[in-house]
Every structure is written in structure tokens, then in C-alpha cells.
Amino acid sequence: MNAPGRMLTEFVDLKAQYAALRESIDARIRKVLEHGQFILGPEVAELEGRLAQFAGTKYCITCASGTEALLIALMALDIKPGDEVVTTPFTFAATAEMIVLLGAKPVFVDIEADTCNIDARKIGAAVTGRTRAIMPVSLYGQPADMDEINAIESKRIFIIDDNIVGAGMKYIRRAKELFDRLQGSGKEWGAQTCLNIVEHPDVLKLARESGCRGLLIGFESIDADSLEHMHKPVNLRPNTKNFSEAIQKIHDHGLAVIGCFIFGADTQSKDVFRRTVDFALANNIDAIQMTLETPLPGTAFYRQMVAEDRLLLTDYPDDWRHYNIVEPVFQMKNWTPREAYESLLSAYSEVSSLKSSLKRATWTLLNTKSLFSTAIAFSWNYHAYKAIRETPTPLAVREGMVLKKVRKRVPVAVRAA
């Protein structure tokens, strides 16, 4: 409350802003009240689409808060206890809070006197063998010095991009420009991409020459019906649908392949675990990630499972921790929760045991001639296997779980990104 006689000086005149946009704001609010979709309504999809277009990206995911966005980014990097994240002390508390929440240690670097942003020149001294990420913060409309930050010495990096070659020639050109700039840097790197990279042998060649040593690819399933179910049409194109040929093209350029597969779709049969393991071994996939299909909140699949009453764990928020892509959390059509989980364990024990991981890492070394690729392949395989084995028995697998009946599929619209 202001003391008598004192004048309040407004930092931002929100009333003037509203007055200028009153008509359009009121109309949009009325529209929301009329359709009643207060959570994930059509306005969310519209905003995400327009933001993605503005930023020049394929996807955009809106979050409830900036704090949540920071947490998602750190979780995507698999930040865990013992890791270090370099950041600035001059920021909102959520920056360090999310680092600590995941058990990691925030390492603070002083700020620049003129911008109050992190002093990029001092970051190098703060980087140690435990550093997993650098989290700069932009303040007062001034971005942190990203050129200086990106120039920090590190011989091995992973480029965080959902698909480094994108979709369309505009993004192919962007990838080539990036690879050109990486040439001569002395860095070895890996990235995530879609199978459409094999449609561009010149890009594969340039990637290898620029230091690329491995690519993480979402194959998702070896069954065409399941790829349609998972909305993965890029894997069904004429030049990508033969997975064996696609993998060989990548291997021919001396690149390792980290293949990701998902199990549990209604279109999959029980033998899909066995067939996938055979496929991975026959095609020398260097590292493999296998997960169970998981209805994550905000997705069409989650809404589908709610509509069909197939969710097994719904005591939120406590049950969210079980939605970790390795625990069965919904009633599958062709497996009980125990069958699905034990099949996943069995598959991992065959392709990622210590003996298998060492054997496959040796093949990776001979093909890529890169210790970096070899270390990634071995570590990815064996540590994933260990993590799965050490996971406590999933709640949905324990005795006494009441199973749901799989009913007729209920149509649910897929929300555009």
C-alpha cells in the first residue's frame, strides 16, 4: 500500500496495452468461454503453430511456466545426480532450482557488468569432467553471448536438435551450412535425425567430414502398421522404408547408428520383441534404445487411453513418476503389463548385456574408427541395460493389479504441433 501523498509510478502501463487490444482480447476470451475447452483447447494448438512458424522450427511445445520449460530441457539431457550445470547467479531462482531438483549441482559464473548476462569468457574455467550442460540466461532483451559460449573448447559434443536435417530443402541447406562451419574445428559430434537423411548421400558425406560420428534415429517399429499408428510417415517413404538399406547407407559413411524402438502398440504382435532383437543384431545397430509405448499427458495418445478407459495408474501426481517409458502404465491389447515388462527386460538382456555390448562396440570401432563412437555405443547399450535391471518392479506389474478390458477404439483427433 502506498503511503499518503505518494504517487505510484507504473513500470508498465498494462491498462493502456489492454485498451489498444481490447476488442480482439475480449473476442478471444469469449470464444474460450463458449467452447469450454480450458485445458489444451484449440487456442493452444494455434499458438504453438504460430510460434513454430515464427521461430522457423518444425515443432513448438507450450508449457505452463518458464520453470517447467527449464525442467523439460534438463530432463531431455538426462541430467542426473552428480552432474554439473554451469549457469548464472543473476537470474530467477527457478534456473538453479530445476538443476537441484534433478540432483545436479549448479556451478555459478559471474556476470558482465554492462549486460548483467553470464560472462562467457569465464565459463571455460568452470567446465569440468562432470559438466553436462551450460544454461545461459538472457536478460532485459539482451541475449547472452552465444557465439562465445559455443566457442568453448570441447572436442566432443552432442547437437540437440530433434532432426538435424529437418524436412525440406531449406533445412537441408541449413544442415550443410552447419556442417561446413564444423569442418576444421577438430570436434567429434553426434546428433538426432530422421531416416530421411539417407535420401541425401552428400549430406551424410559432409556430416562425416565435419566430425559426425553417430546418429540417433527413431525407427520406432519394424512393422509398417505400427508406424502408421505412431504417425511416423517419414519412415514409410520409398527411400526410407527399407530399414536395412538405410542403416547400411549410414554405416558406409563410417557413422554409428543409435536405433530407438517402441513396443506396446495395438498393431504389434507378441513376437515383435523377438523380431526386433533379430533385426538389430543382423543389421549391426551400434546402440539400441527400447521403450514401452507411454501415454504422456497432452498427447493424442493419452486422450485416447482416457477415452477407452485403459490407463492403469491414475493416482496423480504420485503416479506421474511411473510414466517413464519403461514401465507399463496402460492396458495393452496383446500383452499383460507383466508380459510387456518381462519381454522388454529379456530383449535388453540379449542385445545389451556386458558380453553383447563389448562385442558390438568392437564392431563399431572397426567401422567408424572412432573411440568416441565406440564409447557412445558401449555406454548407451550397457548402461541402459543396467538401468532397466535396477529399476524397481513397476507398480503395474505387481500382484493384485486390476487389468482393464481393451474396448473398441474411440476416435480422437490428433492435435497439430
Image (spheres, rainbow, N blue to C red):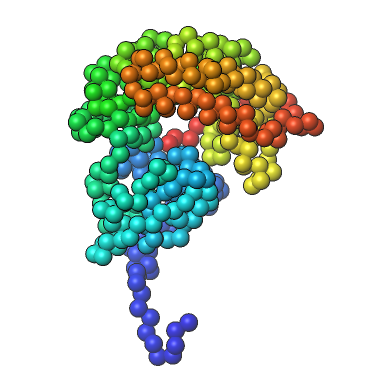
Q: Which residue corresponds to the image point at 44% horizontal and 19% vertical from the top-left?
A: 361
Quadrant into which the C terminus falls: top left
* Total labels drawn: 0
Residue 259 shows in the view = no
Towards the viewer: 129 or 206: 129
Q: Which residue corresponds to the image point at 50% horizontal and 24% vertical from the top-left?
A: 381
Towards the viewer: 259 or 371: 371
191 relative to 369, above or below = below
Q: Quadrant of residue 19?
A: bottom left
Residue occupying the far bottom of the picture: 5
Q: Which residue corresponds to the image point at 40% horizontal and 20% vertical from the top-left?
A: 257
Residue 361 shows in the view = yes
375 relative to 303, above or below = above
Residue 84 position in % (x across, y down): 44, 48
Q: Which residue corresponds to the image point at 48% horizontal and 42% vertical from the top-left?
A: 79
Q: Is residue 39 left or right of residue 127?
A: right
Q: Is residue 14 left or right of residue 145?
A: right
Q: Is residue 139 left or right of residue 379?
A: left
Residue 375 position in % (x across, y down): 41, 26
Q: Quadrant of residue 176?
A: top left
Towards the viewer: 23 or 160: 160
Q: Is residue 136 left or right of residue 121?
A: right
Residue 200 position in % (x across, y down): 27, 18
Residue 354 position in % (x across, y down): 54, 21
Q: Quadrant of residue 60?
A: top left
Towards the viewer: 261 or 342: 342
